[in-house]
Amino acid sequence: MVNYLRAYYYLRMLMRRAYWPRERLLKHQNKKLREIIKYAYENVPFYHEKFKRAHLKPDEIKTVDDLSKLPIIRKDEVKQNLKRMISKGYEISKLKMLRTSGSTGKPLYFYISRKEDEYRKARHLRANIACGQKPRDRWVTITSPIYFNQATRLQRLLRFYAPMSVSVFNDVSTQISIISKLNPDVLDGYASSLLLLAKEVEKRGVKTIKPKILISGADLIDPASRKYVEKVFGVPFYDQYGAAEFERLAWQCEEKNLYHIDADSIIMEFVDENGEAVASGETGEIVCTSLFNKAMPFIRYALDDVGMLSDEDECPCGRTLPLMKVMEGRKDEVIILPGSRAISAFAIIAAMYRLSFYNQIKKFRVIQKGVEHFKLLLSLNEDGLDEKAVETELKQVFIEALNLKSDEVTFEVEFVDEIPLDKSGKFRIVISEVV
Ligand SMILES: [Zn+2]
């Protein structure tokens, strides 16, 4: 059960920090960094060994600039060392397990403490408030059922972090009728879901969905599609950049230009292939260090993504949190199911969560070859899973999640060692070849 009083305290603190003078922010970052480094060295076997191997003592990391002395860690390494990444100070059974969205095609489980959970919720709220959400607004989010918020009646009454959820698995017509009833002030969801919704709202001339702001995270759509969504609903559409391992990382304020980095809670580096910082205005790989999560610290963790620190250092909103640019996103992927049912490609990714062997998946890709034909490429850890059983479960889960009749669609499963990147160098997880 989340302690909402503490989350509220965090929120108040976070709101103030967003306006701190830069020197104060830097001092805070360095202090928190020293704390987490020392803590990880003393309590987390994985980092203790990492430091030893790099011949480093924790007190050699004094400031953010010293971080480059540490090796960068990647998702595969975390997956292989999951148990050894949990702090000795925590019992795994008392921690909350979360998983990455899998949007990079490499799902990962990880753990957070209750305090971290509350802190994350406060950070999420700070980002939403920065683009206009008011504390008692009716907040509706289109998401996967595993992320549905389990708010108590009291929380609903107080409307403090009590978003109402609509399933990403519902087809767009069902979503329209649910959202109309919920009557949101703030409508939040995957950008591709909101795009799909906008298209249907326009087509049918729906007048019953009247949010005052739209917010998206998790996946990006192209700027023209974003403008289209704004036009259909007649309200601004803000974007937030995040990763499940860290929650929100950067977000657009009401100025809706660049993204403020959560720099009081996360150290975000933009690095070259040698792990050295690139100059502001130059594209670099994004590497993050959480300054808060002690249960399972993430120190110099690569996000499999690129971005850049902005040249512009000041935002007209007055917040002093540094600004970044997020790279232009993937084109929206829409999956058309039999009966012309359109669903967001994210529903396919979310369906994968339901698999009992989800954590054994190294990488996956779903290719829609035709309206009635899906091909799944699957690369598994070598844990001797029975391929036949995997195939049966996959089909069953997809049929259920996407609300299909069992003979409506054929699924072809191919087990592979590696799944190549696209020509662009990006890894796309859902590809539709249906025109
Ligand atoms: Zn701003």
Image (cartoon, helix red, strand yellow):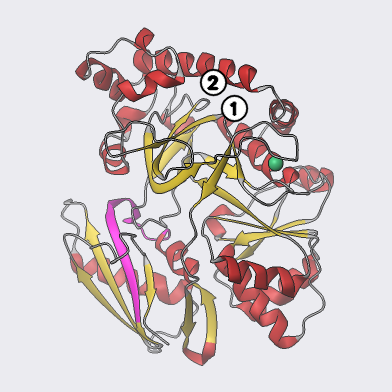
Q: Is residue 361 part of the magenta span, yes or no?
A: yes
On the image, which quarter does residue 349 sit in? bottom left
Residue 360 rendering spot, x and y as whole percentages: 27, 52
Q: Residue at x 74, y 26 (%)?
A: 16
Q: Nearer the viewer, residue 132 or 307?
A: 307
Q: Is residue 1 among the parts visible in the rendering?
A: no
Q: Is mark 2 within 8 Å of ligand 1?
A: no
**Residue 323 vs residue 296: left or right?**
right
Pointer 2 residue: 29
Magenta span: 353-368
Q: Tag 2's secondary structure?
A: helix
Q: Nearer the viewer, residue 98 or 232?
A: 232
Q: Of the residues shown, which amino acid type is indicated by label 1?
A: Asp
Quarter-of-image position of residue 3: top right
Q: Position of residue 212 (x, y in %)?
A: 81, 60
In the displayed structure, 43 sits above or below 72; it is: above
In the rendered image, residue 151 lying in the magenta stretch gets the answer no
Residue at horizontal 43 percent and vertical 43 percent from the top = 282
On the picture, is 420 further left or further right than 95? left
Label 1 belongs to which residue? 264
